[in-house]
Image (spheres, rainbow, N blue to C red):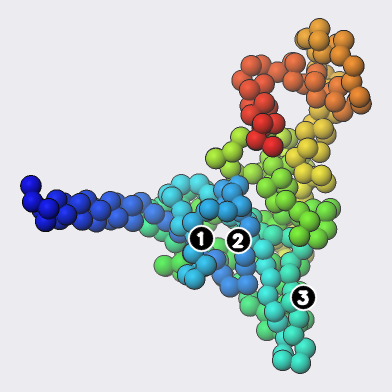
Amino acid sequence: MSKLGALLKVSALAGALALASGAYAASFKVPVNYSVELVDGQKSDFGYNRFSRTITLSPGRHQIVMLFEGTFGNARDSRLYQAANPIVVDIANIPDNAEYTFTYNMPRDNREAEAYTRSQKINLINASTKAALSPEEASYYILTSDSGFAILRDYREDLASVGRLYAPARVFAEMANDDRTGVTAENVPTVKAREGGSAAAIAAGAAAAAPTVQATSKKANTATVMNAEFDQLVQLYEAADDATKLKFVKYIMSH
């Protein structure tokens, strides 16, 4: 085979692969004044193009965490506004080649910007058809916390603390999702993370379950523990089946 023929075959194969990959891609268009914090539990390397403000997604389930921040006001009185809490968009099953996004009432001045940082009422839509997405297609909520400033928070840990994290590339311990949901004055759903993140959730879950769990290991009964929380965690671990123990060990090793 000539070099030219080989080159043409390679080019044709590359083109076919490009078309194939394009046929199985979806995307999410990030509106202005929003920054991407997490995509499927990942803080980076999630296919975000900052120029087009588009996240490339595979068809299927996804979770995107975004934070509102922008400068508003006139030339003499402009200020930077940042929401204390991010929004979490849960996509149930985005189809091939679909592009989702959301719209919101863009603040026109300082007063509206201040109000929007608290409300963050958005409308999830299909970017191509402009049709509203049903709750079965996509939904969102505001992720609140007692931690306060957004810069001090780890959103991945916040989501994991209430069993809301979608992170297929990582292994997290299962956590109980108690009644930590609510709504804002504008009827926007909220989910409140546990203070201290997932570590606090594990300890809280252990404390709640400890009265009904009997330790099955002699080592756990005779070990010297430094505090009650550690003892409860040991009891839960020893009482678990092998599959659960393996998941817990993987979680610890990943941290």
Find the distance from the CA under tag 3 to the CA under tag 2.
20 Å
Front residue of this view, candidates 49 and 119: 49
Mark 2 surroundings within 10 Å by alpha-carbon count, few (fewer than 14), some (14 through 19), many (20 or more): some
* Cβ atoms at labels 3 and 1 below 8 Å apart: no
Give the residue at x 87% y 28%: 229
Would you identify the image quadrant in which residue 120 lies? bottom right
Q: Which residue is mark 3?
A: 114
**Mark closer to the chain start, 1 or 2:** 2
**Mark closer to the chain start, 3 or 1:** 1
Would you identify the image quadrant in which residue 212 lies? top right
The single residue placed furthest to the bottom in the displayed view is: 76
- Point out the image quarter for the C terminus: top right
Q: Which residue is mark 2?
A: 36
Q: Amino acid at mark 2?
A: Val
**Mark closer to the chain start, 3 or 2:** 2
Q: Secondary structure at mark 2?
A: strand
Mark 3 surroundings within 10 Å by alpha-carbon count, few (fewer than 14), some (14 through 19), many (20 or more): some
Q: Secondary structure at mark 3?
A: helix
Left or right for 209, reference 86 = right
Q: Position of residue 196 (x, y in %)?
A: 81, 44
Give the residue at x 77% y 33%: 202
- Asked if residue 200 shows in the view, the reply is yes
Mark 1 surroundings within 10 Å by alpha-carbon count, few (fewer than 14), some (14 through 19), many (20 or more): some
Q: Amino acid at mark 3?
A: Glu
Figure check: 50 above or below 220: below
* Cβ atoms at labels 1 and 2 below 8 Å apart: yes
Q: Which residue is mark 1?
A: 48
Figure check: 158 above or below 216: below
Q: Position of residue 135 (x, y in %)?
A: 56, 54
Q: Secondary structure at mark 1?
A: strand
Give the residue at x 86% y 14%: 223
Left or right for 177, reference 98 = right
